[in-house]
Image (spheres, grey):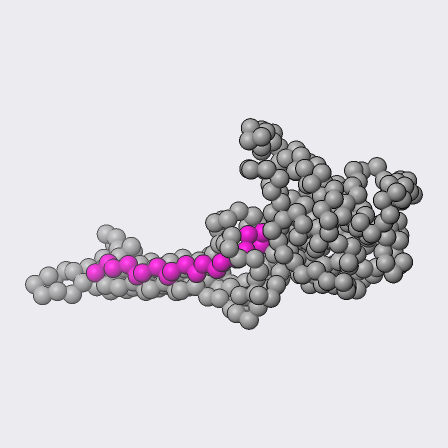
């Protein structure tokens, strides 16, 4: 299935049904009086967060969505049927904005959550409501009001605890494969990851976190180069970033220190808020370096960067160091979630 994370659609709620101007006409009842009923309300257009969806592709070609109109009122004080609501299923994590104003209408972050994006029109009133002691045969009634209509932009932002950053072929996909059940494509050429992947990392029973892998960034990404910049929005909900770096690139380009600084520059250009988030350094592919030189090489990178945040040396291919990293992430995530989650996790140990 093609991954689509942003679409624009037109939504229109149903029109309210018109009120009825009617009079009771029955044999042997000379003074029937007004009996026009009310119309029905127009249906709403509602978005519902569906946990089994992970893309907005259903709305790529279906761009117009209209709810049902309310039925008009009838004689004998019969009220018209209200229009059915139109419920559109979207993935959890979908943000909705008004295209014209840019206003944030809502953010669906929980499964089953509902958001009304277009309110149905109010019903019209029948002439039975206008009768009085001085107006015994009213002929006035009101028409139903039109429903709301607007163009909205739906933007999917994946819900994950941890996000992966790095150049293409830094080993992000291999890492997420080694610590979770996710199976993103892995190959020895750049840009094997073309869309975000999510993986659940379970360190113990009842202790797990969600990790997001996005396409690798390249220099100039903030100006539109490469693929990753358009997916950086999916890291906006994460509380921790893992910056994965190839400790010894085979082609000799983008040495670790240079690679880290280039990604940092792209992050700042994209969002200073995202650049200021907690970020750990992960030096990957230590299996390609002589074991006697590995520690000294890693330390030289840390010293040159003047890195103060936590850092780890791992091999995503062999699994060396990944368990220690996963437990450290779990502890950090539990602290971010708050005392309640942390307490629940400790009880299960």
Report the residue at 85% width, 56% height from top. 249
Residue 148 appears left or right of 255: left
Front residue of this view, candidates 231 and 59? 231
Residue 202 appears left or right of 249: left
Q: Is the magenta stretch mostly helix, strand or loop?
A: loop
Tell me if I can see residue 340 in this picture: no
Report the residue at 63% width, 49% height from top. 180
Residue 180 appears left or right of 280: left
Q: For the view shown, which residue lies furthest in the left direction?
A: 28
Residue 164 appears left or right of 294: left
Report the residue at 73% width, 51% height from top. 317
Q: Where is residue 33 in the image (x, y as percent from the top left)?
A: 19, 59
Q: Specify the quadrant that holds the C terminus.
A: top right
Front residue of this view, candidates 293 and 310? 293
Front residue of this view, candidates 176 and 165? 176
Does the magenta segment cover residue 89?
A: yes
Does the magenta segment cover residue 252?
A: no
Q: Specify the quadrant that holds the N terminus.
A: bottom right
Residue range highlighted in magenta: 76-94
Report the residue at 55% width, 71% height from top. 61
Q: Where is residue 105 in the image (x, y as percent from the top left)?
A: 57, 53
Relative to residue 263, is residue 204 depicted above or below? above
Q: Position of residue 331 (x, y in %)?
A: 67, 34
Tell me if I can see residue 322 in this picture: yes
Q: For the view shown, which residue lies furthest in the bottom direction?
A: 61
- Total label count? 0
């Amino acid at each position: 299935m093609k991954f689509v994370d942003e679409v624009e659609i037109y939504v229109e709620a149903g029109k309210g049904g018109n009120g009825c101007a009617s009079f009771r006409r029955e044999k042997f009842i000379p003074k029937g009086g007004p009996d026009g009923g009310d119309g029905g309300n127009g249906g709403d257009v509602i978005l519902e967060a569906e946990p089994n969806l992970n893309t907005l592709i259903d709305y790529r070609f279906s761009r117009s969505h209209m709810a049902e109109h309310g039925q008009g009122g009838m004689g004998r004080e019969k009220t018209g049927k209200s229009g059915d609501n139109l419920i559109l299923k979207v993935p959890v994590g979908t943000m909705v904005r008004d295209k014209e104003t840019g206003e944030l209408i809502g953010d669906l972050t929980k499964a089953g959550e509902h958001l009304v994006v277009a309110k149905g029109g109010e019903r019209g009133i029948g002439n039975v409501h206008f009768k009085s002691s001085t107006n015994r045969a009213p002929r006035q009634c009101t028409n139903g009001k039109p429903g709301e209509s607007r163009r909205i932009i739906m933007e999917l932002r994946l819900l994950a605890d941890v996000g992966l950053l790095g150049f293409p072929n830094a080993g992000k996909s291999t890492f997420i494969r080694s610590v979770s059940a996710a199976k993103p494509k892995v190959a020895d050429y750049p840009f094997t990851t073309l869309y975000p992947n999510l993986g659940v990392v379970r360190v113990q029973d009842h202790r797990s976190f969600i990790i997001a892998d996005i396409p690798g960034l390249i220099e100039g990404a903030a100006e539109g180069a490469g693929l990753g910049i358009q997916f950086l929005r999916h890291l906006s909900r994460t509380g921790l970033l893992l910056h994965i770096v190839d400790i010894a690139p085979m082609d000799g380009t983008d040495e670790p220190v240079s690679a880290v600084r280039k990604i940092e520059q792209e992050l700042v250009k994209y969002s200073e808020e995202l650049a200021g988030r907690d970020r750990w350094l992960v030096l990957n592919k230590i299996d390609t370096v002589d074991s006697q030189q590995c520690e000294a090489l890693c330390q030289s990178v840390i010293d040159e960067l003047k890195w103060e945040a936590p850092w780890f040396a791992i091999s995503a291919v062999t699994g060396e160091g990944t368990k220690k990293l996963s437990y450290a992430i779990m502890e950090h995530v539990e602290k971010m979630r708050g005392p309640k989650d942390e307490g629940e996790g400790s009880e299960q140990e």
